[in-house]
Amino acid sequence: MLSYRRCRDHAADGRRRRVALLAALAVWVGVAGPSYAQDEEESDPPPVSFGAGLQTSFLHRETDDADATDHFRVNSLRLYVNGAATSNIKFMVNTDVDYGGSLGAPSDGQRTDFQILDAVAQFEMSDQFNVWVGRFLPPSDRANLYGPFYSHHWAVYSDGIQDGYPFIFQGRANGAAYWGQFDKVKVSVGAFDGMSLTGAPSLLGAGRVQVDFWDPEPGYYLNGTFYGERNILAVGVAGQSQADNGSAYSADFLMERKVGDGGAVSVEAEWARYDRLGGYDPRYLTSDGGYFLAAYLFPNSVGPGRFEVLGKYARAHFRKGVTPDYDQRTTEFNLNYLIRQFDARVMIFVKDTAYTAVQTDDFQIGVALQVQM
């Protein structure tokens, strides 16, 4: 019994010492922590914001070599996290669910792997000097820099032209980039991991220059439209290159003008060439093409939102392949109902894709819903 009591007393002494040590540490943190924060003039940490985005659709699809199919799809489910360590050092983490397939090729609906979209440390010292490090969209065409949630039309990245640059997932790459905003000129340049993009060990270089002739567009990521909130006339050129592994380059254009009380007329266009780097069809060394998009946003509200009509025509050429050369022609029409711009919109779409050889013609009609918070 004496031995048991001694052990018990010894254990109690140990607990008292641990409690005292924890109390001392708490006092030290309580004193030292605020002192450090005051020295850095950051008494309150910047807030962390959370958000989410959902794209879901019903799709009727017809092809020449199979029976018509109907699908309900969850096209994208994104989670957003943004925060800051200081007023100049920030971070961004975005994820998406990879369901397999694409807009034009519905998956079996069973793949639900979460993937990293963006994981970026952002050093934003001024409008003219910003450095991003991690995984994000590299300098490229406007279509890549606005992505599906901020595009103007529904069937993005299905025309053989938009964002054919190489990527790990959803346009993203691992690397570092500088970008700066000089009034109405935006410049970005970066280096990215080539092995994860193309399998080649050398770094991939990327750059973009954009000139805004009317209202400037702030920030690194872009929009496909501003829904009449800005007058935009922007021209951008971009290019990527990897030693001994080819190059890709593009030129894009966006014009948007306010009309009446809340209406807008929009015109978007792009030309791109992928020469042994990127492209939609890996069987071909080169591809090139262009598209033209026009839209009209009606100024008058109907219920909680406004209607918009949109049309797009694209033509792409695939050359130097293991199968015969072919062309792709894509025509798309949208009737969009905008409740809260990119945060709540319904998009009725019709898309017809025709090929001169190799591929099978494809016709789609459906309705899509996008909600963000």
Image (tube, rainbow, N blue to C red):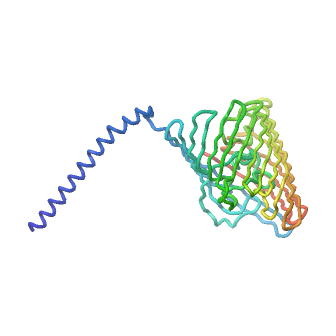
In the image, is residue 352 above or below residue 216?
Answer: below
Q: Where does the image place residue 349, in percent across and percent down from the top left?
A: 79, 52
Q: Residue furthest left?
A: 2
Q: Residue at x 68, y 43 (%)?
A: 189
Is 173 in front, or is 339? 173
Q: Where does the image place residue 329, in percent across and percent down from the top left?
A: 87, 55
Q: Residue at x 68, y 31 (%)?
A: 182
Q: Residue at x 72, y 48 (%)?
A: 144
Is 270 in front, or is 299? 270
Q: Where does the image place residue 76, in percent across and percent down from the top left?
A: 66, 55
Q: Residue furthest front?
A: 244
In the image, is residue 72 above or below residue 266?
Answer: below
Q: Residue furthest bottom?
A: 66
Q: Residue at x 51, y 42 (%)?
A: 48
Is 348 in front, or is 96? 96
The N terminus - image quarter: bottom left
Q: Where does the image place residue 132, in percent across and percent down from the top left?
A: 60, 44
> Position of 354 compared to 129: left or right?
right
Is 15 in front, or is 237? 237
In the image, is residue 190 above or below residue 276?
Answer: above
> Position of 97 compared to 248: left or right?
left
